[in-house]
Amino acid sequence: MNWENQFKKFFAQEGLELSGCNIFIFREDGIPMYGVYKNLDRNAVGALMAGSWQAANALSGFIQGSKEEIFRFSFDTAERGIYILPFSIKKTAFLLGVIFQGQVNPGLIKSKMRQMLERLLQHVEKIKEETPMPQREKFLFDEISDREIDRLFSFERK
């Protein structure tokens, strides 16, 4: 499935509630999947966010506790910062991130991001349920035997 298009569709329907924020979705390796970029290099942001997440995740290995807990990455002051939330779809890991500045209440931004992620995951779940398996209308070969297939792909010439 083309997740890039699905993310665009979700945000077009959802609308962005976070004015003055740069919102991103990256694969865990930093490849951009979706973003609202205001004067930022999306590839640089993706690489830096993914690297920051991976470093923080590695450091979290030193923390005793359940491995089932979902960590979040937050680096902020009273008015600006970065917030990263991990999520997975069909065993593919993604990062939902925001860079914000000039905010009165960073806690509200983080809360809205968690709510946004929850709605995004609900949206994705509906897509998985509604997407039927494509049925082929036409095949390359209508009737072909195993013997004919073997002959097509064998290196032996007769």
Image: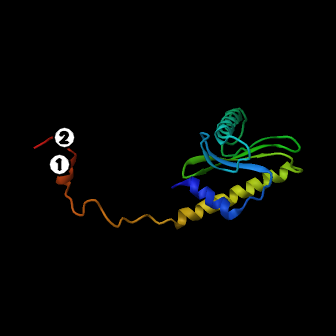
Circle 1: residue type: Arg
Residue 6, how many percent across, how many down? 58, 58
Q: Secondary structure at mark 1?
A: helix
The structure's colour scheme is: rainbow
Residue 65, how many percent across, how many down? 71, 40
Circle 2: residue type: Phe
Q: Mark 1 highlights which residue? A: 151
- Closer to the camera, 49 or 45? 45
Question: Which quarter of the rendering shows the C terminus?
Answer: top left
Question: Which residue is pictured at 19% across the width and 40% down the height?
Answer: 155
Question: Which residue is pictured at 72% across the width and 57% down the height?
Answer: 116
Q: Residue furthest front?
A: 39
Q: Mark 2 highlights which residue? A: 155
- Closer to the camera, 14 or 61? 14
Q: Secondary structure at mark 2?
A: loop
Residue 86, how many percent across, how many down? 67, 47
Residue 84, how many percent across, how many down? 72, 45
Q: Residue furthest left?
A: 158
Instruction: Reply above or below: 124 against 26.
Output: below
Question: Which residue is pictured at 66% across the width and 42% down the height?
Answer: 42
- Left or right, 145 with respect to 70, comes to left
